[in-house]
Amino acid sequence: MHMSFFFCTFARFLEIKMEILIAIGAVLVAMVLLSIGVILRKDHRFRSQHIAENARMKQDKIHCATSQDREARKTSKMDVSDL
């Protein structure tokens, strides 16, 4: 009885080990595929994800929410009586 328990546990260990190796392999493949764009770029950098650096957003005068809020607070002074 003791030996059968050992083999069952060892077989389960091998299954878990294979699952872990497959997961690590999948993560490695994903990292390689995601890095291809960076490797092929001339400057080897990601594009900025900030909204203020997008040409189309600049054209439409759209800024990030923090900047727009700051501008709105400077330009309009709201009074309590307006509510």
Image (cartoon, rainbow, N blue to C red):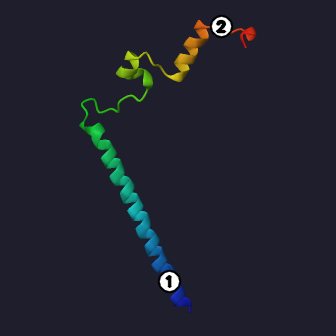
The one nearer the camera, 19 or 51, is 51
Quarter-wise, where is residue 1 in the image?
A: bottom right
Q: Nearer the viewer, residue 68 or 42?
A: 68
Q: CA distance from mark 2 to mark 1?
A: 74 Å
* Residue kind at label 1, given as amino acid type: Cys
Q: Position of residue 43 (x, y in %)?
A: 27, 29
The residue sitting at 48% across, 77% down in the picture is 12
Tell me which residue sits at (47%, 19%) in the image.
Answer: 63
Label 1 sits on a secondary structure element that is helix
Whole-percent x and y of residue 31?
A: 35, 48
Q: Which residue is mark 1?
A: 8
Where does label 2 land, which residue?
Answer: 77
**Pair 2/1: label in front:** 2
Q: Residues within 10 Å of mark 2 (few under 14, many from 20)?
A: few
| For residue 70, above or below residue 2 | above
Q: Secondary structure at mark 2?
A: loop
Q: Indicate the position of residue 41 as horizontal and vertical percent values.
A: 26, 33
Check the image and name the residue furthest to the right: 81
Category of crowding for the residue at label 1, using alpha-carbon neighbours closer than 10 angstroms: few (below 14), some (14–19), many (at least 20): few
Asked if residue 81 lies left or right of residue 42, the reply is right
Residue 59 image position (x, y, % from top left): 37, 16
Relative to 2, residue 71 above or below: above
> As shown in the figure, which amino acid type bears the numbered disc 2?
Lys
